[in-house]
Amino acid sequence: MMTIQDVLSVYAAMADLTEQMVQAAQRSDWDALVLLEQRCAAHAQVLREQEPRQPMRGAERERKIELIRQMLKADRQIRDLTMPWMAQLSKLINATGTERRVVNAYGSV
């Protein structure tokens, strides 16, 4: 079982990773973004498996809340940066599918 300090250290590491994810998204470095997200997910899995069930109190609780808020803010920034790229990717995929159906129906020119 993790100590409170262990838990806060994992949350701090996740907050740092989400900030790095924002920076990767700003650079359109999608490969780095995926790798960072995987690292963040691994930390979240550790918390799911090992975080004590009793609630934190006082300063530790406030620190945890602050770190979660940082992660949520970073998540919003990442979504704002990735949504246009995802929309563009979706258009490309749909266009390719349409082109493939036309070729299948009428043959190549």
Image (cartoon, grey):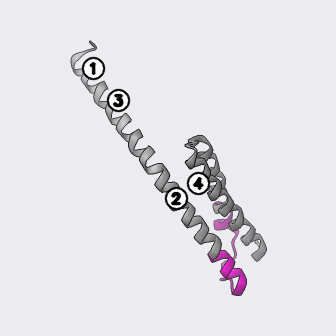
Residue 69, x across and y down, in percent: 58, 71
Q: Residue furthest front?
A: 26
Kindly identify which numbered label has been placed on residue 77. Answer: 2
Q: Give the range drawn in magenta.
A: 45-65
Three-letter amino acid code of the residue under disc 4: Val
Task: In this rendered view, identify the residue nearer to me: 67 or 100.
Answer: 67
Kindly identify which numbered label has been placed on residue 22. Answer: 4
Q: Residue at x 28, y 14 (%)?
A: 108
Picture quadrant of residue 18: bottom right
> How packed is label 4: few (under 14 Cα within 10 Å), some, or many (20 or more)?
many
Three-letter amino acid code of the residue under disc 2: Gln
- Looking at the image, is mark 1 or mark 4 earlier in the sequence? 4
Residue 20, x across and y down, in percent: 65, 53
- Looking at the image, is mark 3 or mark 1 earlier in the sequence? 3
Please state the total of marks drawn on the protein image: 4
Three-letter amino acid code of the residue under disc 3: Thr
Q: Which residue lies furthest to the left in this view?
A: 106
Q: Distance of mark 2 from mark 3, alpha carbons?
A: 30 Å
The nearer-to-camera label among 3 and 4 is 4
- Looking at the image, is mark 2 or mark 3 earlier in the sequence? 2
Q: Mark 1 points at which residue?
A: 103
Q: Principal SS element in the magenta part?
A: helix
Kindly state the secondary structure of the residue where label 2 is placed.
helix
Kindly state the secondary structure of the residue where label 1 is placed.
helix
Kindly state the secondary structure of the residue where label 4 is placed.
helix
Task: In this rendered view, identify the residue nearer to me: 102 or 48.
Answer: 102
Picture quadrant of residue 74: bottom right
Kindly identify which numbered label has been placed on residue 96. Answer: 3
Q: Do the residues labelled 2 and 1 touch (CB within 8 Å)?
A: no
Does the rendering let one see residue 105? yes
